[in-house]
Amino acid sequence: MSSPGITSMFTNFTKLCKGLALVLVVGHLLVQFVPATVPYLALIPASGYFELSVHGVVISTVSLLFMGKFLEPVWGSKEFLKFIFVILPFAGFHGVLAGLLVGIKQIIPDQEVLLVKIKAKWLPSITLVLSIASSFFTLNSAAYLPTLIFGTYMGWLYLRYFQRRTETKLRGDPSDDFAFSTFFPELLRPIIDPIASIFHRMLCGRSNATSEDHGYTTSGAPLPGSDSAEASRRRERGARALEERLATERLVPPRNKEELQSDALDSV
């Protein structure tokens, strides 16, 4: 007899994620029974919204459902779907999953999310390291490696500079905790930061209008209301979403609306 808490862990997924997962499964079945559809679904097998293998579709579906449980309530359904479509044309669905890991890094960086007690902020980096290592031994891993790398970078680029934030009407996340160098060990950051600053100036340092729209001044300093305080509020929303999910999975009633509103006001 299964525990109600374990049962609820595999439910309570958002409608949007369940719909996307259904499309993923149907796409897999379609290419299995009608192979002629492959050229219409993707240019290459590694870049498209479908999986060729059974284990691949299982891993992708489960990953989408679980990551969507935390990201969609924080971003909103429209932004969640937009994020997926931005990455999908360039990196395929494996790239989308890599990008969603970057979103997890952004909203709950210090949350330990696995049994081995790995903090969420390291998940994208560990995934890439393992993928690079495995690519030396299997051709399948080597084929998917470019999509994982590009999906990770595209996910960070979009969240860092282009995602529209409803709270401030600005775009991106300029906090130091989400800088490009945070994907690397502390020892390498003094080397990575000067290189990353070149691309930062290219993206948001050309004009005052462009810089302000991204939450920065032309000198590179964050504008009022776009600094680490806003990023902290984003992380607090992510932590609350995680807490509510865990409370549901343990059959513990989540906090009432008044308490959540009070926390939100305190965080502001």
Image (tube, helix red, strand yellow):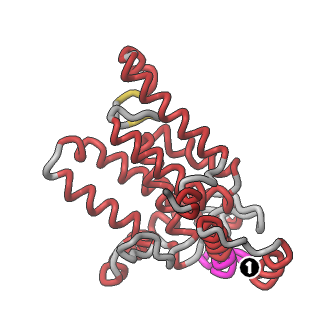
Image coords of residue 154 (percent x, y)? 47, 53
Q: Quadrant of residue 48?
A: top left
At horizontal 58% and vertical 54% (from top left) the residue drawn is 68
Element at badge 1?
loop
At horizontal 35% and vertical 83% (from top left) the residue drawn is 186
Taken as a whole, is the magenta stretch helix, strand or loop? loop
Horizontal arrangement in the rendering, residue 15 relative to residue 51 (left or right): right
**Most foreground residue, 190 or 252:** 252
Q: Is residue 217 visible?
A: no
Q: Residue furthest left?
A: 137
Residue denoted by label 1? 224
**Most foreground residue, 217 or 56:** 56
Is residue 40 highlighted in magenta? no
The amino acid on which the numbered mark 1 sits, given as a three-letter code, is Pro
Image coords of residue 148 (percent x, y)? 36, 51
Q: Residue furthest right?
A: 258
Image coords of residue 86 (percent x, y)? 55, 44
Image coords of residue 222 (percent x, y)? 65, 77
**Most foreground residue, 196 or 29:** 29
Is residue 232 highlighted in magenta? yes
Horizontal arrangement in the rendering, residue 68 relative to residue 96 (left or right): right
Horizontal arrangement in the rendering, residue 166 relative to residue 117 (left or right): right
At horizontal 67% and vertical 51% (from top left) the residue drawn is 79
Q: Is residue 229 visible?
A: yes
Q: Quadrant of residue 85?
A: top right
Disc 1 crowd, CA 10 A, few/some/many (<14, 14-19, 20+)? few
Quadrant, the C terminus: bottom right
**Most foreground residue, 57 or 195:** 57
At horizontal 55% and vertical 59% (from top left) the residue drawn is 9
Image: 45 above or below 223: above
Count of residue discs: 1
- The residue stretch that appears in magenta: 219-233
